[in-house]
Amino acid sequence: MMRPVAWLAALVAIAAAHPVQPATPPALPPYTQAYEPAGVDERGLWMQVDELERNLRQSPFIIADPHLNAYVRGVLCRTVGDDRCRSVRLYVVRNDGFNATMAPNGMMMVWSGLLLRVRDEAELGSVLGHEFAHFELRHMLDRFKQQRGVTDILSWAAVLSPTVYTSISATAIGSIFAFSRAQEQEADLLGLRYLAESTYPSTAAAQVWERLMAEADATAAGRKRKPSVHRYTAGLFASHPTELSRATYLRAAAAKVGDAGDPAAAAYRAGLAKWLPHFLADQIKLNDFGGTDYLLGQLAADGWTADLLYARAELYRQRGHPRDLVSAAQFYQSAIDGGFAGAEAYRGLGLSLLRSQQVDAGRTALRTYLERAPDASDTAMMQALVAQ
Amino acid sequence: MFHNGANRGWPGGFMTIFRWAALPLLVALLIGVAPAHAQEKTGNKPGFTLPTGSARIVLMRPSISVGEQSTGGMFEPNADWTMQARDNLARAIAAVQGQLGNSVVDIIEPVGADAAALAEYQGLFSTVADQVIVYQFFPGNRLPTKKRKDSFEWTMGPGVATLPGLAGADYALFIATEDQFGSTGRKAVQLLAALGGVSVPVGVHKGFAGLVDIRTGDLVWLNADLQMGGDVRTAEGAQRRVAQLFEGFPGRPVAVAVVAGR
């Protein structure tokens, strides 16, 4: 562990070096299998997450589907290589947010909201590679030590000299976040190196952040809010570099590497096909019309499938302006014409039509729903609507 | 910043691809942990008695976490100490069995879907226990429905009866302890701060033990202490901790025999 004086020097250095300049992606470090934690701090951190993992494995939020798990793991292995990916336990978590996490012991969580948002295996690989880079670089341990060092200094300053404390406290706390941002950038660049060495193109990494910014803008517009300005410089308490700076330095780094490859978009759509309707349903429940409509438009870049049309119909029916119901009815009909398998499309179609003064057509659609799903939980309610 | 449990400032313990809220970390850094005030330590379901030698009690896997508290108040988990505490506490619980007047057996952990159901109920128990401590044991903080004298009505629901691993048992015993030993630096800061008239808390030593009636799911006894004694890293300390954990245990033949002073 570094002594407090050394930490103070490091702290000043971090403050002076801010903002961190983008670098070229590093060469791949040699990798050792079956790493065991060393030292009191690292073993303690591992013990804690080992205990968390015991519980996590039993969580109802973990998607157990072996096919989905094997597929996502396959993308990780193709990104970081077979030897590296063996040390990871990967859990797909049913969570509509965009995120993935890595614990110091190699427990990786991939949120379903991330799977919904990336368009191909290369983009997913860029995120999984970033998380794996945190693990390979032992970032959690360094972050723990840095936070402890800074809070130690702050405590000493608080009791020894209130003047010093007042003058350094903001910088010191800011340095915790500056340290976190520097680690994130380091993981971004090593993640990009994995991509460059893999069959996937490293340009995929920047695309994730570009679309995330666009989605945030669409969400804000849909909620009649002023879109937040995308900046290069992160705020004092930001844990990560801004999306704009990540997109920029990742694009620049990918251009320097200059690799090419197949992003495997068709394989990704096929790998996710079974779960896409579920993840779309989660997204619709977020009541985020602007962001969801943008997301659906992105997913439909190569054409509107029946699943996407049904999701769009649900989204419009949920907002429920009179004009939305007309659009929703059209989308439901297109989904049905496009071969949407579930009876619920007739339910949505019927309800949309009933509320658009097309009573007869609406009842006909609801009757079809009742015929196709006689055991549905809302049968009685739908029968009442048909009988009116 | 990475305490025992995901409920404080998550995801402080993980690296993430996307931003997380900085607020919980900031609050933890700037304010620290509020010291515990006067609290009641034991709650019993009114009218509940546990006759000697009549019940079979299953001990769930105890939640044990031991580490150091850094100068700045961060928890530094320690794998060796936690392992020692796990061994010592298990031996101390086995030793105290005879004094509880009933047989206590360790749960055999199931696998697969059964394990998931059990994990949910363990999570539910720790939530219920937290609520009892916050809303019943601190009299000034009581919920209106908990203000009546001699009222102790908490339950996990009848679903407990269907849990795997509990068949044939009468009661489930839950135990949790968390220890953060103050580092030398923390103690020095406390001393210096005390000279200036400021109180800096050193160390966290808390634990609880609870007994659940498997047939009804009712919580029949809970003992919680946010300032416990006994160094769980040693055999003697663990015995003392266990004695404190079982204070007020219903149906115990000799109530004070194992309490070796605090």
Image: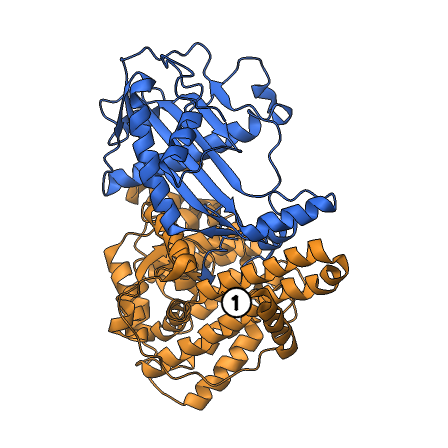
Q: Name the residue under label 1.
A: A2
Q: Nearer the viewer, residue B55 or A261?
A: B55
Hue of chain A?
A: orange
Task: Tell me the residue at 30%/81% (across/down).
Answer: A199
Q: Is residue B94 left or right of residue B154?
A: left
**Image coordinates for residue B190, horizontal then vertical, percent:** 64, 46
Q: In this view, does A43 lie above or below A188?
A: above
Letter of the chain shown blue in the rendering: B
Q: In which quarter of the image is residue B66?
A: top left
Q: Is residue A259 visible?
A: yes
- If the image is split into quadrants, where does the C terminus of chain A sit? top left
Q: In this view, does A183 lie to the left or right of B56?
A: right
**Image coordinates for residue A204, horizontal then vertical, percent:** 42, 78
Q: Is residue A60 visible?
A: no
Task: Tell me the residue at 46%/30% (across/down).
Answer: B129
**Image coordinates for residue A362, horizontal then vertical, percent:** 43, 46
Q: In this view, does B26 lie above or below B219?
A: below
Q: How crowded is mark 1: few (under 14 residues within 10 Å), some or many (20 or more)?
A: few
Q: Nearer the viewer, residue B65 or A367?
A: B65
Q: The disc labelled 1 sits on which kind of residue?
A: Met
**Image coordinates for residue A144, horizontal then vertical, percent:** 49, 60
